Amino acid sequence: MVVSCVFLSCAYPHPDAMALDTSEVFAPGLSDIEVYYRNRGGQNHIITNIVGYGASRWWNPYVSFELNFENQKTTYTLGLANFSTVYSADIDVDISVGLVTQFKSFILEIGTEVTYPMKVVVPYFQSVLTRPFHPNTDLNFRINAGALFKLKSGHELLAQVSVVHVQKTVAGYAAGYNVQLSKLMELITEIGYRSVLYGEIGFIWTLGA
């Protein structure tokens, strides 16, 4: 039920930095605040903050800011994008287009998600393509395939496999358990492996819900 981290994912060296969840449009107005912490292999710490504004199924702009701590070095990443539900019937199709920067260069990022909502299980497919705005650079991508299982009210179990290409191609897998703690807050958790073991915890606040 998250938008931002599903899509803002693989522009920079740590493509794991995305939430294990499916996407939904924001509630009307300045309504979405998300905070995530991720640890990769005990050596890399990533903190991501997202703020989103819901206008319609077509306009859901959001900004993200990420702090990445690794080997006594800190990097900062800023993202700006818009998320849209372009088709909603038996299947839902979502698209996100945005820019990501570490203040040295810009990267174009295009994300898609296709879900097939059912009563108990929601199969999904996600992809993200990124292209830096400077010559002699490769197209990077991430592809996810997974399923969301609806358990008791407000509880979701997710399982996913993925393939990521950033300089080299790496496969991985992950599982997550998400809980609606209240009408305004959702807990996001994830554990997975892609080159190294990683874990994530996050909170989503829906203002005005």
Image (cartoon, rainbow, N blue to C red):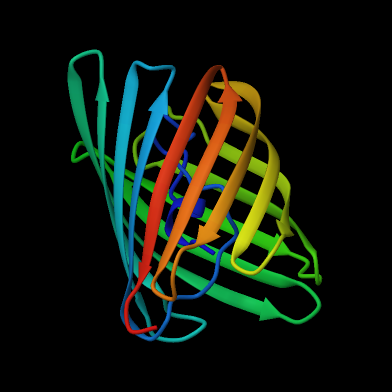
Which percent across, then down, holds residue 124?
72, 56
Which percent across, then down, holds residue 15?
47, 34
Viewed as shown, does residue 112 lie left or right of 50?
right
Label total for image = 0
Q: Residue 64 occupies which quadrant of the picture? A: bottom left
Asked if residue 14 can be seen in this view, the reply is: yes
At 59% from the left edge and 31% from the top edge, which residue is drawn?
Answer: 164
At 53% from the left edge and 40% from the top edge, which residue is drawn?
Answer: 190
Q: Is residue 155 above or below residue 161?
A: below
Viewed as shown, does residue 24 lie left or right of 187?
right
Residue in the foreground of this view, choosing between 205 and 108? 205
Q: Residue 81 occupies which quadrant of the picture? A: bottom left
* View extreme (top): residue: 71
Residue in the foreground of this view, choosing between 169 and 64? 64
Q: Is residue 50 above or below residue 14?
A: below
Q: Is residue 119 above or below residue 99?
A: below
At 47% from the left edge and 44% from the top edge, which residue is drawn?
Answer: 18
Viewed as shown, does residue 74 lie left or right of 58?
left
Position of the C terminus, as image quadrant, is bottom left
Position of the N terminus, as image quadrant, is bottom right
Asked if residue 167 can be seen in this view, the reply is: no
Which percent across, then down, holds residue 61?
36, 71
Viewed as shown, does residue 73 lie left or right of 56?
left
Which percent across, then down, holds residue 139?
53, 36
At 19% from the left edge and 19% from the top edge, which residue is drawn?
Answer: 73
